[in-house]
Each structure stands twice: as structure tokens, then as C-alpha cells.
Amino acid sequence: MKNWTRANIPADLSGKTYIITGTSSGIGTVIAYELAKRGAKVIAANRNIDKAQKAMAAVKQPTDDLSSLTTLALDVSSVKSVKEFAEQINADASIMQIDGLLLNAGIMALPERQESVDGFELQMATNVLGHHLLTSLLMPKIKLAPKAVVVSTSSSASSTVTDPKIWEDINAENKYDPWEVYGLSKIAAVQFRDGLREVIKDANLSHKIHAHATHPGLTATPLFDASKGLFASVFRSVRGIFMMDAAQGALSTLRATVDETLPDGSFIGPGGITGMTGNPKVIKVYNPKLALDPVLRKKMWDYCNKATGAVWK
């Protein structure tokens, strides 16, 4: 479909249950809003609940019914927090299945290396490890949906990685380059998609559980505010001129979530000439030489399992 827009989202999503991480700003807020206002049960998982609720209140229209949206605490960079959140979801009898798990939370190009509470480099902990563990823990309820989808968020920034040796230093203990580490985390989003598809295939569930990756495009979000370097400076200078707003940037993930005609394992991103703006369509994965390398994918998958204790059943 050439011009997939908000109008293509089904008008009635009642009966669907979606969990989305990171809805306190940017595209996450928009995604949660668009799904909830159409009647879907939406669990918005956020480290800062107050900020998330204020963000939703800012986009809500007077006629909107968002009673199906619930905001719950989740610090995706913390193994303990992820486990507690998953236990809460799995124990909730009102959540009979998970139709969509949208791995949206993320941080970008932190100026200095920081560590999570578990001792992992913070970008990898937030963008990769937490989502890896969360998906493994929620698989029992994902399997109960008639048709389910898991969506991981990648980026064109994955092209900043050129040396496969970085897979030997995933925790960035020997070298920390803000954009290179961020780029690795966005390659990991594609590797996660493909690793998850293998797990699903081994369980003979490919007919009912799909995994996609998305690229939101050049979108004006608060992610750029804390990032460092020339890229961030340029992006901040053109914000509002060449960048899409959050409503447009959210369309890639929204399409990956609700468009059941998409081939399993799709990579969805803006379809404009530059690949940075425009309506979402199936596009080629960025940096395929590294992102699609099966050896590097296994290294990342094994690292995530070991770091988080994730078990796939």
C-alpha cells in the first residue's frame, strides 16, 4: 500500500490487548493513544508514570474515551523491574492474551557511558536487554492470542556501525562511542526480530505470531535532547523544518502492529525519497551486512540470554 495513513488503522480494536514500552513522550505517546482511542486494551509501561499520564492528557481530545488505557511502572533497563512487570501482567486474569508487544522505549547517544542498576551499558540495557527479557517472560500470553505481533524499534543509525569487532565489546567496557553504541542497539533490534522468529518457528507458531522491526524515520522527539555529537546538533537545528512530527513518525510502528497483510519479518519505515520521511512501507534493512549476519545475531542473542537470564519456552 503506497500511502498507508492513520485512516488505515481499524476503527474498532476492542478485544485487542497491546503492551507498549515508553509512552511518556514522542511516538510512544501517539501509538498508545491511537490504539486506546479505538477501544484496544493498552498497557503503557513507563519508568515515569506521572510523565506518561501528563503526555497522554496533552494529546487526548475531549471526545476521546481512553478508559481502556492503563499506565504501569516499568524501568526497562532493570532486570528486577522487568520481572516484576511481567509477573504483574501474567497474573492479571483480565489480560487473557497479548495481541501486540511494542518494544518502543529507548535512549539515544548518551554523552558519557552510564551503567544500569545491573551493571550494563545503559543504552544496551534500555534498548535491547530489557526488551529481550520482557518478551521471553510474556511469551505465554502472546501465544494465547489468535494472531499476535512483536515489534522492535530499529533506526537508520544502525548504519553507524562498521566494525563487527564491536560484538566482542557489547557492554562498551573497552570503548564508548555514543553513536556507535546506539547504532549497535538498533542493529540488535533487527537481530532480535530474526532471533525471535527462529524461536517462534521452532515452536511451530509462525502462522500466528509475527515479528517485525521498524524505523520511525527522522522524527522530532525528545530523544535528541540528551544526545551528543554532530548528528544530534544537526538534527536539533532542523527540528520542525525537515523532521516529521511524532504523529507521522508513529505510523511505521502502528502499521507493523495492525496491518496483518504484512509479510512476517518485515522492516517498516518511511517510504519517501530519502527514506527518512513519508508514509510507512516495507523497506530494506539498514546495514544488512552486519544486521543480517547470522553469526553476529547469535552472539547478540546469546549475550542477551546470559545477561538477563532469559529462557524461551
Image (cartoon, rainbow, N blue to C red):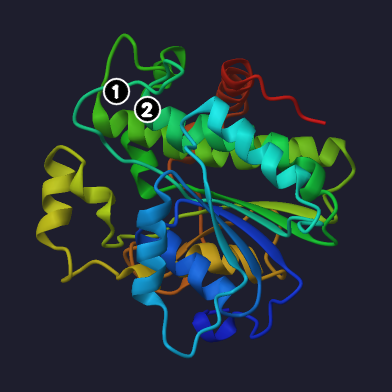
Reply above or below: 52 against 81.
below
What residue sits 31% from the left and 40% below the top? 108
Q: Residues within 10 Å of mark 1 (few under 14, many from 20)?
A: some
- Secondary element at tag 2: helix
Reply above or below: 63 against 281.
below
Towards the viewer: 75 or 186: 75
Numbered label attached to residue 122: 2
Question: Is 175 placed left or right of 95 in the picture?
Answer: left
- Secondary element at tag 1: loop
Reply above or below: 297 against 153.
above
Q: Let me know if residue 272 appears in the view.
A: no
> What residue type is disc 2 on?
Leu
What residue sits 44% from the left and 35% below the top? 126
Quarter of the image where one finds residue 191: top right
Numbered label attached to residue 132: none
Q: Residue furthest top?
A: 174
Quarter of the image where one finds residue 270: bottom left
Sooner in the amino-acid sequence: mark 1 or mark 2? 1
Question: Is 61 placed left or right of 41 in the picture?
Answer: left
Towards the viewer: 34 or 205: 34
The picture places residue 192, in percent across and down from the top left corner, at: 60, 37
The picture places residue 295, in percent across and down from the top left corner, at: 60, 22
What residue sits 34% from the left and 41% below the top? 107
Numbered label attached to residue 114: 1
What residue sits 39% from the left and 47% below the top? 48
Cα separation between marks 1 and 2: 5 Å
Quarter of the image where one finds residue 15: bottom right
Q: Let me know if residue 37 appears in the view.
A: yes
The picture places residue 313, in percent across and down from the top left corner, at: 82, 31
Q: Quadrant of the N terminus?
A: bottom right
> What residue type is disc 1 on?
Gln
The reply to whether the C-beta atoms of the residues labelled 1 and 2 are less than 8 Å apart is yes
